[in-house]
């Protein structure tokens, strides 16, 4: 059976709707009952990040050298970000919160999400999980990744100031929040999320529009500024990261400078 121009290889249903896995031109993708892809994997290179917005979410590496500590991910999808972190940062410990049990099952069975002692998956609402642990997990995480914003909008439980305040509380002083947003800077949902982020993180924010896509990646920095603090050192780091990961970090840096001219000085010395 064909769907979204590709071969439907798996389909199931839960209380939140349809879960589908579709293969097209060597790419396996997760769909939630609509054409937009929630996650994708290259069948011949499953360790590479297939989607441009997911590659852009690695831009946090421009400002933080490694992840040798706890990380929290809200939203699993096919597990692309989770697999990337486990593969490249052997000293990290990850907690992933995913609201749909069926998504976890598919990530394991169809997208190669490993059983790894460094990985803990919790089936829960991400917004509730974060708000309920803001005090008990205070200053615990070096990286917090939020990917719960799709073409229809942001998940209701994270669409509030309390969620982002809790994220800030759970991050270490030098921690970074990375969030996938959607819809362009004129979109009301984006504007609301940017306002909540700014209030929570003292406006130490950068936004990276994804070329040719509707995604905008947000980076929010906690009280300690990044160790990499000059444009010159960032350029050198971007070149080194490109060689290491085969991802266009120099382009990320150029776009960050282009779209954050008035706010970049809050994060680095330009």
Image (cartoon, rainbow, N blue to C red):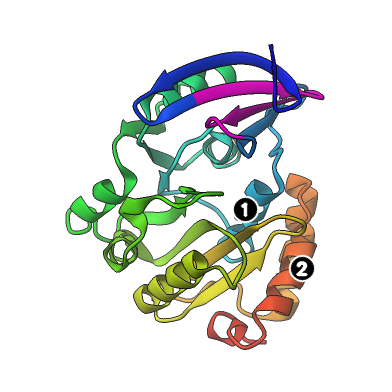
Circle 2: element type: helix
Q: Give neighbour class at mark 2: few <14, some 14-19, many 20+ (Cα, 10 Å).
A: few
Look at the picture and state if 137 lies above or below 76.
Answer: below
Look at the picture and state if 33 lies above or below 54.
Answer: above
Residue 153 screen position, x and y as percent: 48, 53
> Residue 58 got which mark?
1
On the question of residue 91 being in view, the answer is yes
Q: Is residue 74 left or right of residue 170?
A: right
Residue 104 screen position, x and y as percent: 43, 25
On the question of residue 221 being in view, the answer is no
Residue 17 sits in which quadrant? top left
Circle 1: element type: helix
Number of marks in picture: 2
**Which residue does the image show at 42% across and 56% down from the upper left?**
142
Look at the picture and state if 125 lies above or below 30.
Answer: below
**Which residue does the image show at 34% across and 27% down from the upper left?**
15
In the image shown, does 261 or 175 lie closer to the viewer?
261
Residue 234 screen position, x and y as percent: 70, 71
Query: Disc 1 to disc 2, how far (Cα)?
Result: 16 Å
Quadrant location of the N terminus in the rendered image: top right
Quadrant location of the C terminus in the rendered image: bottom right
Residue 198 screen position, x and y as percent: 42, 77
**Which residue does the image show at 29% across and 37% down from the upper left?**
124
Look at the picture and state if 123 lies above or below 176.
Answer: above
> Residue 258 got which mark?
none
Q: Confirm whether the magenta stretch covers residue 104.
A: no
In the image shown, does 205 or 223 lie closer to the viewer?
205
Specify start and end residues of the magenta stretch as a single range.
19-34
Q: Confirm whether the magenta stretch covers residue 28.
A: yes
Q: Is residue 113 left or right of residue 96?
A: right
Q: Which residue is mark 2?
A: 236
């Amino acid at each position: 059976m064909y769907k979204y121009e590709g071969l439907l290889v798996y389909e199931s249903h839960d209380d939140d709707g349809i879960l589908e896995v579709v293969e097209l031109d060597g790419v396996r993708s997760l769909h939630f009952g609509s054409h937009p892809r929630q996650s994708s994997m290259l069948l011949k290179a499953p360790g590479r990040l297939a989607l441009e917005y997911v590659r852009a979410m690695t831009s946090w590496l421009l400002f933080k050298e490694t992840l040798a500590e706890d990380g929290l991910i809200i939203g699993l999808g096919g597990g692309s970000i989770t697999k990337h972190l486990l593969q490249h940062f052997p000293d990290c410990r990850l907690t992933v919160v995913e609201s749909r049990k069926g998504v976890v099952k598919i990530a394991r069975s169809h997208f190669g999400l490993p059983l790894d002692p460094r990985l803990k998956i919790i089936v829960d609402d991400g917004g509730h999980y974060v708000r309920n642990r803001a005090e008990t997990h205070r200053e615990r995480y070096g990286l917090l990744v939020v990917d719960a914003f799709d073409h229809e909008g942001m998940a209701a439980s994270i669409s509030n100031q309390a969620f982002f305040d809790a994220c800030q509380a759970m991050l270490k002083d030098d921690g970074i929040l990375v969030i996938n947003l959607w819809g362009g800077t004129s979109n009301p949902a984006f504007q609301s999320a940017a306002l909540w982020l700014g209030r929570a993180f003292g406006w130490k924010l950068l936004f990276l529009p994804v070329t040719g896509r509707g995604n905008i990646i947000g980076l929010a920095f906690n009280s300690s500024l990044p160790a990499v603090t000059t444009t010159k050192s960032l350029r050198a780091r971007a070149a080194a990261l490109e060689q290491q990961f085969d991802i266009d970090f120099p382009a990320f840096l150029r776009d960050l400078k282009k779209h954050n001219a008035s706010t970049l000085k809050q994060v680095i010395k330009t």
